């Protein structure tokens, strides 16, 4: 099977955010990206670990319910399905990312069950906090292009390890705080230039700025920026960055130019802000998003 006819591989964590009242919300940045791409009609295979537990069974059931490919799910015999504990103090959330989860330990041999070629590999940084590096090496070998979504979460990174993970990627996405962390002593376009060169990024650096929008800086020197569109019916911003990344990946797959990609990614991120949570089970939500794209 050729890379162009194969699904995109989305590698990383799937987990539940667990709130003080017992509410559990399915997520994880790579899982959200895979879910969005599937719902947008793109061939995609999510690669990650779940536990041999009720939470893992729920992940698989939720994927089955929307017809999402589950062949990349590795069921870990010992470690539990991923969990992030959310605590609220005066309305502000804080997060405890639990260690030693199933997504931390997917064997390198699991790559043998996956497509032998893929046009695009997406991965973040959290699922590589303590392992999975041999698996990533196998996935990189079969990928036409690589997109890295930087997710710096204390205490699970160092600057050097993050730089090593993004080195040589085609496209890297990160927010302004992460840019300052990885390119200290610089600011603005100077920081973008420094990181493009230091990490040997091949195509572009994407920098998100929440309500202020985002920018894309290419290795050829092109820079496009746009504000975030208004969201009159804002519910929450959970998953907005993952939604944005999903459409950048879609644009890479479809060959859109960078201004078009940026405009559509910002619009979709704004649409996700009208949801409660990061994704939707409703295919109509995604069909509406694609109306003006095809």
Image: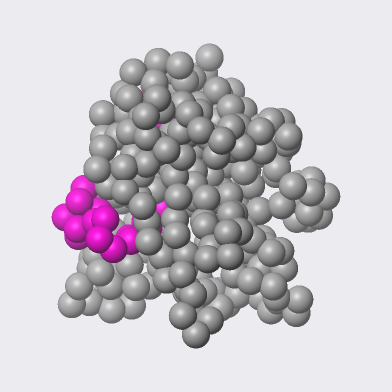
Residue 53 appears in the rendering = yes
Q: Residue 144: x, y in percent?
A: 42, 31
Q: Residue furthest front?
A: 21
In this image, 109 relative to 285: left or right?
A: left
Residue 148 at x, y = what percent? 39, 48
Does residue 72 appear left or right of residue 279 in this picture? left
- Measured along the vertical axis of the image, is residue 75 above or below residue 147? above
Residue at 18% over, 77% down: 185
Point 33% across, 25% down: residue? 107
Residue 118 visible in the picture: no
Q: Position of residue 282 (x, y in %)?
A: 79, 49
Q: What stretch is highlighted in magenta?
A: 141-165
User: Which residue is rendered at x = 22% and y = 77% of the image?
Assistant: 186
Q: In this view, does 68 lie to the left or right of 213?
A: right
Q: Which of the two residues, 178 or 220, is positioned nearer the viewer here? A: 178
Seen in the image, is 223 located left or right of residue 288?
left
| Quadrant assignment, res 292 | bottom right
């Amino acid at each position: 099977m050729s890379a162009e006819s194969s699904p995109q591989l989305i590698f990383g964590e799937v987990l539940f955010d667990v709130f003080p009242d017992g509410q559990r919300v399915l997520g994880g940045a790579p899982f959200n990206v895979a879910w969005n791409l599937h719902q947008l009609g793109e061939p995609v295979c999510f690669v990650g670990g779940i536990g041999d537990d009720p939470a893992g069974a729920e992940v698989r059931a939720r994927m089955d319910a929307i017809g999402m490919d589950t062949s990349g799910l590795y069921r870990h015999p010992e470690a539990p399905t991923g969990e992030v504990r959310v605590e609220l103090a005066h309305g502000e959330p804080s997060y405890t990312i639990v260690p030693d989860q199933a997504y931390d330990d997917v064997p390198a041999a699991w790559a043998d069950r996956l497509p032998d070629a893929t046009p695009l590999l997406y991965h973040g940084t959290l699922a590589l906090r303590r392992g999975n590096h041999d698996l990533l090496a196998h996935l990189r070998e079969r990928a036409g292009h690589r997109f890295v979504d930087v997710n710096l979460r204390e205490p699970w990174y160092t600057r050097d390890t993050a730089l090593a993970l993004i080195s040589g990627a085609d496209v890297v996405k990160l927010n302004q705080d992460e840019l300052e962390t990885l390119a200290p002593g610089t600011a603005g376009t100077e920081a973008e230039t420094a990181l493009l060169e230091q990490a040997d990024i091949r195509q572009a650096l994407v920098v998100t700025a929440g309500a202020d929008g985002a920018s894309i800086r290419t290795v050829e020197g092109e820079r496009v920026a746009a504000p975030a569109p208004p969201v009159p019916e804002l519910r929450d911003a959970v998953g907005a960055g993952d939604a944005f990344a999903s459409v950048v990946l879609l644009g890479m797959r479809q060959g859109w130019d960078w201004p078009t990609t940026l405009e559509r990614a910002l619009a979709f991120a704004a649409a996700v802000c009208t949801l409660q949570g990061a994704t939707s089970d409703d295919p109509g939500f995604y069909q509406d998003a694609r109306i003006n794209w095809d």
